[in-house]
Image (tube, helix red, strand yellow):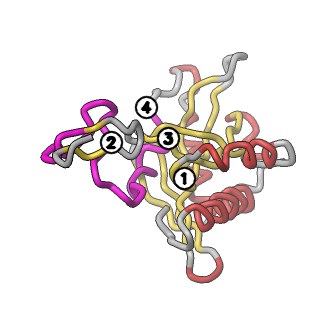
Amino acid sequence: MSSSTIACARCTLGNHYSNRFCVGCGLPLGATAPDAEAGLDALGPYEAPEPADADASRLIQEIAQRCGFEASPSSHGWRLTVPLQLDRRQAVYLGYAGTDPEGRSILSLVSVCGPANDRDTRILLKLNARSVEGHFAIKVLRGEEYFVVTENIACGSTGQIDATGLVRRIAEAADGLEDRLSRGLDLY
């Protein structure tokens, strides 16, 4: 690679130094910090609730209010901001996630932890084997792979859950990994 090129951090392709984005994969060149706004895409592409399940939007808003955390509309759902210890905060996104194979409407809770890496993938898969609520996953946000904690709930069972406790546990799990991945930063 010559001195007039810069290697992409993701795909290692050499790019001309004047390029702002990698011509191979689109990653911003020279970026050293994770995208703190990636969480805005945590719910993924919008899939409108089925006409037969007009209550999905109402249920999402009801859970957001029932949790008691700071809630604000975000992309295709709600952003719940959970205060944690040591003045940390973690965003948990709540929205419609389509239907399961039996046709039941699903609500999704997603919290971003940080950019995915191969080193931690095996550890997180092992932790999933012991998880009761929420599980670690990899989700593509803004063209990058991120570790997230996610939980899917059938719309019919939302009245039976402790929404505040569930959102808090998801936030705590996500923040614990975020703290480790970011070396103490509070980005998401």
Chain-order first, disc 2 or disc 1: 2
The front one of 23 and 187 is 23
Residues at marks 2 and 3 touching, judged by CB atoms closer than 8 Å: no
Disc number placed over residue 27 in the picture, else none: 2
Residue 126 place in picture, x, y as percent: 81, 45
- Asked if residue 20 is among those painted magenta in the image, a careful observer would answer yes
At label 3, the amino acid type is: Glu
Mark number displayed over residue 145: 3
Estimate the x, y position of residue 90 in percent, counting from the top left.
Answer: 56, 65
Callout in the foreground (2, 3): 2
Q: Residue 112's mark?
A: 1
> Contact (CB < 8 A) between labels 1 and 4?
no
Q: Quadrant of residue 153?
A: top right
Name the residue furthest front. 2
Residue 17 falls left or right of residue 34: left
Amino acid beneath label 1 = Val
